[in-house]
């Protein structure tokens, strides 16, 4: 009697954890995808070489997340294609006493992406953005160029989160 009671209590206690598992939990529509190829994204902006920066940052973020492995185009279960649509720089703070001079800018990168399966069918898609702010010194172009990796890092984090968690 005591053994069956202890077994019933033990089973009841352990049944609360049946739906949980350790490790990455992919969305259901990507359950068959283990590896992803990330070719260099297309650049629709006027900033040179920003596509390499964003592509490399996305690859590093996939490696850090660990849900999907990075592979070459031939060996991958899916291919992530992207287009950098816009790089927006908007003023955030102005110089006191002069509303025409800007002291701080917000920088936003926008990427349109598609995740394609081996046979070319679309598995996922959407738009993602990343932003940061930067202060203007004597050379605004250099200041903007130094802020791009921070915006690309946030964009990559948002993209990998959308694909690995499904939202």
Image: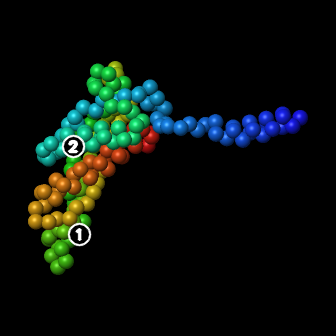
Closer-to-camera residue (84/5):
5
First in sequence: mark 1 vs mark 2 = 2
Quadrant of residue 60 within the rendered picture: top left
When the figure is inspected, residue 137 is found, relative to residue 16, above or below; the finding is below
Instruction: Say which quadrant the N terminus sits in.
Output: top right
From mark 1 to mark 2, how far is it between C-alphas? 27 Å
Disc on res. 93: 1
Asked which colour scheme the image uses, the reply is rainbow
Q: Residue at x 27, y 57 (%)?
A: 132
Quadrant of residue 73 within the rendered picture: top left
Name the secondary structure under disc 2: helix
Around disc 1, counting alpha carbons within 10 Å, would you say few (fewer than 14), some (14 to 19), or many (20 or more)?
A: some
Find the residue positioned furthest to the front: 3
Closer-to-camera residue (79/57):
57
Q: Is residue 74 left or right of residue 144?
A: right
| Residue 117 appears in the figure | no
Around disc 2, counting alpha carbons within 10 Å, would you say few (fewer than 14), some (14 to 19), or many (20 or more)?
A: some
Name the secondary structure under disc 1: strand
Residue hosting label 2: 53
Q: How many marks?
A: 2
Q: Residue at x 29, y 21 (%)?
A: 74
Q: Residue at x 29, y 48 (%)?
A: 153
Q: Is residue 34 left or right of residue 39?
A: right
Closer-to-camera residue (24/160):
24
- Percent x, y for residue 49? 15, 42
Q: Residue at x 20, y 40 (%)?
A: 52
Say which of marks 1 and 2 sits in front: 2
- Percent x, y for residue 47? 14, 47
Q: Is residue 84 left or right of residue 32?
A: left
């Amino acid at each position: 009697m005591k053994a069956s009671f202890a077994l019933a209590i033990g089973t009841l206690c352990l049944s609360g954890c049946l739906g949980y598992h350790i490790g990455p939990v992919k969305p259901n529509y990507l359950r068959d995808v283990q590896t992803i190829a990330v070719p260099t994204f297309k650049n629709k902006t006027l900033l040179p070489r920003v596509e390499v920066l964003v592509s490399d940052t996305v690859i590093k973020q996939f490696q850090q997340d660990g849900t999907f492995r990075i592979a070459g185009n031939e060996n991958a279960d899916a291919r992530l294609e992207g287009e950098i649509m816009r790089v927006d720089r908007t003023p955030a703070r102005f110089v006191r006493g002069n509303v025409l001079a800007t002291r701080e800018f917000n920088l936003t990168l926008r990427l349109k992406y598609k995740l394609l399966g081996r046979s070319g069918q679309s598995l996922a898609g959407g738009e993602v953005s990343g932003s940061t702010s930067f202060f203007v010194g004597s050379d605004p172009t250099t200041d903007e160029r130094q802020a791009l990796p921070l915006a690309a890092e946030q964009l990559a984090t948002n993209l990998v989160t959308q694909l690995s968690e499904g939202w």
